[in-house]
Amino acid sequence: MRMDPLTVLRDYAVRGDLDKITRNGDEFRFSNEYTFPCTSETAYRSKQGNLYTLETLIFFLNNHQLKHTEYLQIARTHKTPSVTLPDRKPLLDYLQGRSASADAIELHYPAPLIHDPPPPPLPPPPNHLAAAHPDDSNNDPTVRDTAALDYVEMIRALERPLKDREALLECKHRDFYSVLVASTKREEERHRMESQQRKDGLVAKSRLMGTDDRGVWKEGEELGFDTAAAKAKMHFNFKGSKIGEGVPIILVPSAFQTLITIYNVKEFLEDGVFIPTDLKVKQMKGAKPDCVTVQKKFSRDRVVTAYEVRDKPSALKAEDWDRVVAVFVLGKEWQFKDWPFKDHVEIFNKIIGFYMRFEDDSLESAKTVKQWNVKIISISKNKRHQDRAAALEVWDKLEEFVRSRSHN
């Protein structure tokens, strides 16, 4: 005797005999009464158009008490197709006997049960087609075309979708973070190449026309270049000055307990994305850089000043301290030990300070910092789309400070 798996499953659920349904390999066995393949399609059609499989419905019945988000998560873990939220209540009401029927039910007897004979071949064209032209049905093209159309419709009626929209959107085994990083790196390289080509062109033109040609530097300013940095570059190339002269410096702590370090400062300031230091250390395989160069890349129409980021103040020479414009503070006094300043009051009058914290951290962690003249920047532990606003806040404060300092 052949039975629809939906009817059998409902009968077992109403009787409270779900524990008598066991899985053996690719089959579900209902006591000693029935056996169905796990992937058998039932008569319950989802609002998305696909028929739910027996495996999907049994898993749903065994986990219906969970919140829908928790149910979806555990279904993905077990690699089992899930019931959609719109179908959840009417399906459960039917399976547990609270409703006698549902509009989504299309009773049928799809695949044969185990040991059943194969399905019969497609039937011949409807009799009325042959009866309409008993003598020339084989020669009449209209009859042949109509018969062929009926066969196509019969085939289409047996078709079933392999995946629904929800399954396609799950994108298993796809890591969108890696896609974001790769895309960001390509964009960064493109901007760097364009910027370098323009700078090289400006310097080359200056060499031909003379380093004091004001028209060349004016042209560079109109293009958005930091001509002071370009002049400094020409100065150390032609006059023998030390490399790096004129490039402003940002200091970050070398301790890992701070949010911004030399490992992740570039992604945060250039891309507006916070990546935990421990993750960056793994990606870089422990290769700690001595110096990192960062630029504000949020504006595509102009080139801005580059900054050197360092985490070893003890390696700075006396003349280097004039180039230090910002520091990310740890919140500890010992961070400023051996700095060439009287106290933190003098430090934060000459250097702008930033303190990075998670927005839900206790206020006690910033108790010392609040006594200093520093800017407190908060970011979320989980909402990475908010990082960009925090990075922009740092750039705005930094550029404002650099402008005021250059005017003094």
Image: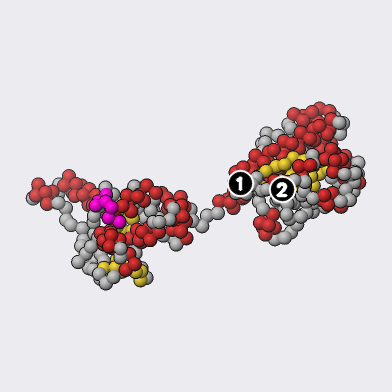
Dot 1: what SS? Answer: helix
Are the two marked residues, 1 and 2, in contact with CB atoms closer than 8 angstroms? no
Colour scheme of the picture: secondary structure
Does any portion of residue 16 appear in the rendered image? yes
At 84% from the left and 28% from the top, the residue drawn is 214
In the image, residue 321 lies at what x, y percent? 87, 44
At 25% from the left and 64% from the top, the residue drawn is 112
Q: Magenta span has 100?
A: yes
Q: Amino acid at mark 1?
A: Arg
Q: Nearer the viewer, residue 367 or 240?
A: 367
Q: Amino acid at mark 2?
A: Glu
In this picture, residue 209 sits left or right of residue 133? right
Q: Nearer the viewer, mark 1 or mark 2?
A: 2
Q: Nearer the viewer, residue 316 or 182?
A: 316
Query: Taken as a whole, is the magenta stretch helix, strand or loop?
Result: loop
In the image, residue 210 lies at what x, y percent? 86, 33
Number of the label disc, if any, that sits on residue 52? none
Residue 8 figure quarter:
bottom left
Q: Nearer the viewer, residue 134 or 110?
A: 110
Which residue has dot 2 on it? Answer: 364
In this picture, residue 84 sits left or right of residue 148? right
Q: Which region of the structure is painted magenta?
A: 96-102
For disc 2, the neighbor class at 10 Å (few under 14, some 14 to 19, many from 20) is few
Q: Magenta span has 283?
A: no
In this picture, residue 78 sits left or right of residue 110? right
At 26% from the left and 68% from the top, the residue drawn is 34
Which residue has dot 1 on it? Answer: 384
The C terminus: image quadrant: top right
Does any portion of residue 152 appear in the rendered image? no
Dot 2: what SS? Answer: helix
